[in-house]
Amino acid sequence: MDLGGDVQQFLTRMRARLTPEEAGVTVFGGERRVPGLRREEVAQLAGVSTAYYTRMERGNLRGVSESVLRSLARTLKMNDAETEHLFDLARAASQGARTPRARPRPRLPQAAARLIDAMGDVPTVALGRLGDVVGANALGRALFPHLFPETGEPLNHTRYLFLDDRAHEFYTDWEGSARHAVSALRLIAGRDPSDAALMTLVGELATHSPEFRTWWAGHTVTVHAAGTKAIRHPVVGELTVTFETLALGSSPDVKLVTYLAEPGTPSADALDLLRSWVATTPTSTGREHSTPQSPARGQAKPEGTPNP
């Protein structure tokens, strides 16, 4: 990770998106050669010298005080996620360059695994910080069949989004889901730019996915802990589910993502159909289902295992 370059690109983007009118800057005619605010305008609004702000925007946040960072965040109208990212970048800059290091792979505690299995009517998937699937209950596996191949380990969801063509068909708004994944990785990179697994994943995706490469360079950061997902399920057809992300106190690197459909909607009917199919499809391990040929909604479900 190029921390200085990341700081420069992030602050430049924040400055370019804000118009003088939005920032309360009076414009006295003449053609402006840069989009958004000028550096001297940001400096004045933030209460620092132009030279000091220029130093920050060129990638040097070492030693910048909390009060200056907060003033800069207010001036550039950063949201909570962007402000957090700015502080993470400043903290990393103050710590100096660090040797890339491997972090332990996230693991789902046994108690949490029992918990999500007990939530039999609620599709639940456990994800590590980089999108590694570390657990799921039967309904969660059935809702996202591509992530759970019949043999081998579950897929990494971030790799699936960008490197598996099935993801484009599965997610109705593939771009929205993919952009949120990039933003999540950006936040992680700000917190710990020396994370070796993150560096490997970003390098792989940037090499093989032009969309990822473009959006990564955009330095957009958002928190996407709740919302809706519209999917084209290979068994029950199109449905929209709401999701909530739950933190685990015993394993901070693992999040539980739960999915439900609005009651009384066709999506709720589709999810009920999936529940019925999971309940009536025997498996030896309770782990994978293959995807049978999808029947018309309301017809009896053929026996067999899903084939993602």
Image (cartoon, helix red, strand yellow):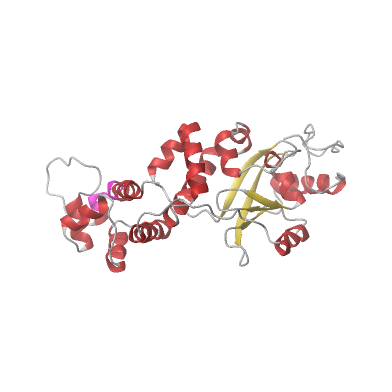
In this rendering, the answer to whether 175 lies above or below 242 is: above
For the C terminus, which image quadrant? top right
Q: Quadrant of residue 106?
A: bottom right
Q: Residue at x 72, y 38 (%)?
A: 149
Q: How many numbered callouts?
A: 0
The picture places residue 102, in percent across and down from the top left corner, at 53, 52
**In the drawing, does residue 283 fall left or right of residue 137?**
right
In this rendering, the answer to whether 190 lies above or below 151 is: below
Q: Nearer the viewer, residue 157 or 98?
A: 98
Q: Residue at x 28, y 67 (%)?
A: 65
Q: Quadrant of residue 79?
A: bottom left
Assess whether residue 34 is covered by the magenta stretch.
no
The picture places residue 93, in percent across and down from the top left corner, at 34, 57
**In the drawing, does residue 66 fall left or right of residue 308?**
left
Q: Residue at x 16, y 55 (%)?
A: 51
Farthest-out residue, front: 99
Provide the residue span drawn in magenta: 15-21
**In the drawing, does residue 168 fall left or right of residue 284?**
left
The picture places residue 297, in percent across and down from the top left corner, at 78, 38
Residue 25 seen in the figure? no
In this rendering, the answer to whether 232 lies above or below 74 is: above
Q: Nearer the viewer, residue 260 or 246?
A: 246
The picture places residue 43, in percent across and down from the top left corner, at 20, 57
Residue 112 seen in the figure? yes
